[in-house]
Structures are given as C-alpha cells and as structure tokens.
Amino acid sequence: MTIPEFSLRPATEADSALLLSLRNDPLTRANSLNTELIHETTHAKWLAATLRDLSTRLYIFERDGVAVGMGRLTRGPQAHVDVSLALLPEVRGHGYATIVIEMLLKVATGWTVTTAHAICRADNIPSLRAFLSQGFSLEQSIVLLRKELP
Ligand SMILES: CC(C)(COP(=O)(O)OP(=O)(O)OC[C@H]1O[C@@H](n2cnc3c(N)ncnc32)[C@H](O)[C@@H]1OP(=O)(O)O)[C@@H](O)C(=O)NCCC(=O)NCCS
C-alpha cells in the first residue's frame, strides 16, 4: 500500500470551478451560515475579491498532486485567524480534515496572530472532531442567534 502525499498550494482563478463545487456541495451548504446555492457570477466576484484580499489566503489541498479540497485562513481584527476547510465528498471520512487543519495552522504560525478560531455547526461532528484533535477547544460562551427577516 502506498502512502499518499499531501500538499497545500495557494488557490488561483483556475481553481474557480473546484471552489464553486465545494461551496455548493450539499453538506458544505448545510454546514454553512448561508445555505443558499451560490451562482457562478456571484462566485466569480467573490473569488476575484478574495484573491486580492490581503487578510485572506485561500489554499487548495492536494492528494498526490490532485486537488481534493480547500482551506482558508482569514486574519481577524484581534490577532486571531479564522480557519475553514472543505473536502470533496469522495475523499471524506479518511481523516484528511486533520491533515488540512494541521497544514493551515503551520502556515498561520508565520502570521502575527495569537489565536486560531473556527466556526462550526454543533452537529458537524467530523469538523468538530478534527478541530478538537488539533488542540482547539469549545468556546461555549458564543451562541449564534438567527431570525429570518421578511
Ligand atoms: C468537515 C470536513 C472537512 C471533515 O472531513 P472528513 O473527511 O469528513 O472528516 P475526517 O475523516 O477527516 O474525520 C474527522 C473526524 O471526524 C470523525 N468522523 C468522520 N466522519 C464522521 C461521521 N460521519 N460521524 C462521526 N464522526 C465522523 C473521524 O473519525 C475523525 O475523528 P477522530 O480524529 O477523532 O477519529 C468534511 O466533512 C467536509 O468537507 N464537510 C463539508 C464542509 C464543512 O462542513 N466544513 C467545515 C466548516 S468549518
């Protein structure tokens, strides 16, 4: 059995289709604050702005040179960095989330930040477990309240 090689590389405009399919994947949508389907035009604008944004870094996670997921680091206002990730459905359940988070945290150690945050739905068990395994702890004082407006 060969052991796969994993790497993280900066995302580019050429990754647009992969990033959109990850974003519109049913599980990613269900686990997001905004569960709407994202249109291609909206996505293209978002990607262009994100690639220009100096406080955000988008990465593509590769297994043996093939893109299988994404990770994002966003510098927050209080010396913290927000971490998020998504994997293609066909590679989920193999423990890769922990690898992506570990790689993202390594990148973030080069930033002038003191804390890493992740926002995770309470029922997103794989994501919760992966972050907990990387030393994150639950910040129980934060509760999201939501109301649909007419
Ligand atoms: C969140 C996500 C990246 C996790 O990746 P994954 O490949 O599904 O999870 P992994 O195989 O790496 O497993 C992570 C942990 O969850 C556990 N796990 C995986 N699937 C599970 C399931 N269905 N039920 C319970 N636990 C599960 C694993 O055992 C592992 O825990 P352990 O390290 O204690 O053994 C992936 O599900 C995904 O892309 N989801 C959609 C996007 C998303 O929710 N992103 C997170 C927003 S912060």
Image (cartoon, rainbow, N blue to C red):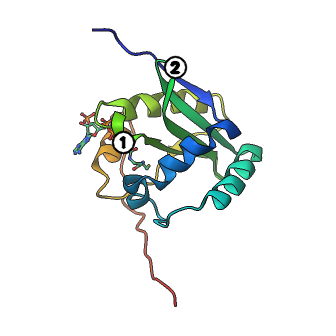
Q: Is residue 119 above or below residue 107?
A: below
Q: Is residue 88 above or below residue 109?
A: below
Marks 2,1: beta carbons within 8 A:
no
Q: State the residue position of label 2.
A: 65
Query: Horizontally, is 71 left or right of 113 in the view?
Result: left
Q: What residue is rendered at 52% in x and 38% in y?
A: 70
Q: Report x, y in % for residue 104.
A: 53, 32
In the orientation shown, which residue stands out farthest toward the bottom? Answer: 150
Q: Is residue 54 above or below residue 106?
A: below
Q: State the residue position of label 1.
A: 89
Disc 2 element:
loop
| Ligand 1 lies under 8 Å from the Cβ of mark 1 | yes
Of the pair 54 and 117, the residue shown nearer to us: 54
Query: Horizontally, is 83 left or right of 110 in the view?
Result: left
Query: Horizontally, is 9 left or right of 116 in the view?
Result: right
Q: What residue is rendered at 75% in x and 47% in y?
A: 53
User: Is the residue marked by circle 1 packed among few (<14), some (14-19), or many (20+) residues within 10 Å?
Assistant: some
Q: Hey, what amino acid is under mark 1?
A: Pro
Q: Earlier in the sequence, mark 2 or mark 1?
A: 2
Q: Report x, y in % for residue 92.
A: 33, 37
Disc 1 element:
helix
Asked whether residue 19 is in view, the answer is yes
Asked whether residue 12 is in view, the answer is no
User: Is the residue marked by circle 2 packed among few (<14), some (14-19), or many (20+) residues within 10 Å?
Assistant: few
Query: Horizontally, is 39 left or right of 90 in the view?
Result: right
Q: Hey, what amino acid is under mark 2?
A: Gly
